[in-house]
Image (spheres, rainbow, N blue to C red):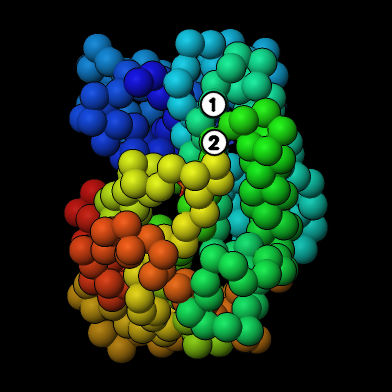
Amino acid sequence: MRALVTGGAGCIGSDLAGRLVKDGYEVAVFDNLSSGKQEHLKELLKNGKFRFIRADLLNRKQIGDACKNIDIVFHLAANSDIKYKEGDPTDEDLRLNTIATYNVLEAMRVNGVKKIVFTSSSSVYGEAGKIPTPEDYPLRPISLYAASKAACEAMIGAYSSMFGVQGWILRLANIISGKSRKKGKTVLTDFIEKLKQNQGELEILGNGRQSKSYLLADDCIEGIITALNKSKVELNIYNVGPEDFLTVNEIASIVTEEMGLKNVKFRYTGGDRGWPGDVPRFLLDTRKIRKLGWKPRHNSKEAIRISIKNLLNKG
Ligand SMILES: NC(=O)c1ccc[n+]([C@@H]2O[C@H](COP(=O)([O-])OP(=O)(O)OC[C@H]3O[C@@H](n4cnc5c(N)ncnc54)[C@H](O)[C@@H]3O)[C@@H](O)[C@H]2O)c1
């Protein structure tokens, strides 16, 4: 199998590309390095079954060329900076997620590529009335990022029914790893950076009581591969996450502890969420993917601690 991994220089994509090479795929990573890093691919670049294409999904010719002689696209490239601040452009998610995904699907259609794996997000449910939230719960996005992910899902559904493209849509919880990005901080890289600058005080967005679930990239990739290998209908939609959540306050305490800091004062920006469009509380119902035999090795708390250790070890 020949796979194209868009966003393959990113935190999840680079690990996924490595896993696919291990599983026997020939892998091409397509990435513009806007937030991903070539150093994430250092080892893979030595492998004869791997190649790197530095290109942009908004360039239709580049993605069209990359889709030639490909059997499956793992489409992970997206806008990583999901925190909206006043004054930010409002079309980033539309361009980098919705239009970029259309470009991928169109390039696939023209080149006869029939399988797409897409990383969607738990955020598509918005502030769901049912927690844990199952896959058949209505999608009510409350951010531009989530709206664009829902639009991508809908478009994959349309290409599936109109052009016979088989789709795997994974709605991911917060995914963390020991890797960092050029832009789009995670809660961990944000806290670590702030604490390196000021060891006495930590600014926490919102009131610290936001509750979210966290999954290690390795567990996430195992979930993606399980869904792909074991679920074979036209459109395969799965939540991927752990069964627990943590508050932002708990994360802040773990980070300060792992950094060996004492008496750090937490200062809150206030409100029940970190930024406009942030979903303050979510937990995915993952019974559907568990029935396929997937189970994460680590819960949210363990995932957070492991990632902090990895990030701190890398300096
Ligand atoms: N990390 C999470 O918590 C999380 C949660 C839910 C869903 N997701 C989704 O998983 C996917 C991967 O996330 P990640 O955390 O690895 O992010 P990431 O930023 O590390 O990776 C995204 C990659 O896409 C590349 N990219 C962005 N725009 C591009 C374009 N126009 N052309 C080519 N390359 C482009 C970036 O350079 C980067 O390498 C994304 O689709 C994201 O929305 C992530």
Residue that badge 1 annotates: 114
For residue 36, say whether it is visible: no
Q: Is residue 64 above or below residue 23?
A: above
Q: Residue at x 43, y 42 (%)?
A: 232
Question: Residue 259: x and y, percent?
Answer: 24, 70
**Could you classify mark 2 by the number of other residues whose Cα lies within 10 Å: few (under 14), some (14-19), or many (20 or more)?**
many
Circles 2 and 1: CB atoms closer than 8 Å: yes
Left or right of 188 in this view: 297: left
Q: Position of residue 12 (x, y in %)?
A: 39, 45
* Structural crowding at the residue carrying mark 1, measured as other residues with C-alpha within 10 Å and reported as few (<14), some (14–19) or many (≥20): some
Residue extending farthest to the front is 233
> Disc 2 designates what residue?
166
- Amino acid at dot 2: Gln
Q: The residue tagged with tag 1: helix, strand or loop?
A: loop
Residue at the image point whose x is 66% and y is 16% from the top: 110
Q: Secondary structure at mark 2?
A: strand
Label whose residue precedes the other's in the sequence (2 or 1) = 1
Which residue is drawn at the image coordinates 36% and 83% (left, top)?
A: 250
Which quarter of the rendering shows the N terminus?
Answer: top left
Q: Nearer the viewer, residue 44 or 147?
A: 147
Q: Is residue 248 above or below residue 76?
A: below
Q: Is residue 24 visible?
A: yes
Residue 28: horizontal and vertical position, in percent? 41, 20
* Residue 112 placement (x, y as % from top left): 58, 17
